[in-house]
Amino acid sequence: MTVTDYSPRRWEEASPGNLNGQASALTAIGPLRHNWRYGKLLIGFFLRRYLWLFRNAKARPLKKLGFIHFARWVLITELPDGSARRPLKPIYLLFESNFNGGFDEYIEAFSYVIPEAMEDIFGALYNFPGPVPATPFKDFIRRHDYEADHFFSAYPDATAGDVAAALELRAAMAELQTRDDGDVWSFAAHWRGFMTKAQAWV
């Protein structure tokens, strides 16, 4: 990976390797504080369970925004060391995501839509400024961001919304095919219903 340029240039200009068509990649990593408010021994226990809760419940408002392909948080507690594993002190938090649109808009969505969750997750990192206002939070993410050496997108010209719409359209077409029972008038009714729904996907 290449360390991101922290100059005043836009993130997209400073990190061209993070762009592939309509999609952008973000990879940020940072060490957790030993004196975090939940205590050193509870960091891994708490964050692992909180991230499960975030994925299954707290992230729902973000899913409705429709521009996030993928996002995950990982706790790195050890590294391979020959045939053994070497514990890491401190523990590191890795954040990866693929999204559409600009970096500023993406981080602002986290900052203003789910600020409490961002405080709970990133609050364990050194020098975390808080999610609001968004500008210090964006600067914080940029300082921990690493430009991707390789970023592959199966559909670089499609947004997350385009892919979701295509999947809905494919499922509706498969269902329409099962409605062809030889009755022309019955199929015509199903066709009109299909076309009505398909307007939202094309």
Image (cartoon, rainbow, N blue to C red):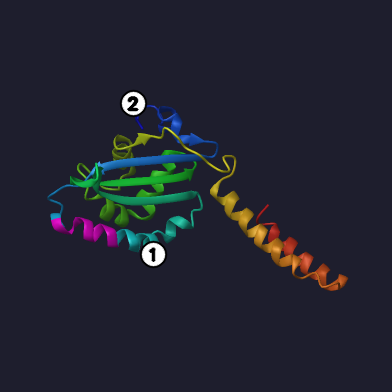
Q: Residues within 10 Å of mark 2 (few under 14, many from 20)?
A: few
In which image quadrant can residue 165 be found? bottom right
Residue matched to label 2: 7
Q: Nearer the viewer, mark 2 or mark 1?
A: 1
Span colored in magenta: 41-49
Q: Is residue 87 above or below residue 8?
A: below
Q: Residues within 10 Å of mark 1 (few under 14, many from 20)?
A: few
Identify the secondary structure beneath mark 1.
Answer: helix
Q: Nearer the viewer, residue 85 or 180?
A: 85
**Which residue occupies 42% across, 39% down?**
103
Which numbered disc, 2 or 1, marks the residue that appears first in the sequence?
2
Q: Please name the amino acid that badge 2 sits on.
A: Ser
The answer to the question of whether label 2 and label 1 lie on touching residues, with beta carbons closer than 8 A, is no
**Which percent across, then down, holds residue 44?**
22, 56
Identify the secondary structure beneath mark 2.
Answer: loop
In which image quadrant can residue 61 be found? bottom left
Label 2 to label 1: alpha-carbon separation = 36 Å
**Which percent across, then down, holds residue 95?**
34, 46
- Secondary structure predominantly adopted by residues drawn in magenta: helix
Q: Is residue 57 magenta?
A: no
Residue matched to label 1: 57
Q: Is residue 45 magenta?
A: yes
Q: Please name the amino acid that badge 1 sits on.
A: Ala
In the rendered structure, the answer to whether residue 96 lies left or right of residue 184 reads left
Q: Is residue 112 above or below residue 171?
A: above
Task: Please state, as top left, top right, bottom left or bottom right, where the N terminus lies in the image.
Answer: top left
**Which residue occupies 43% across, 55% down?**
62
**Which percent across, then down, holds residue 178?**
74, 69
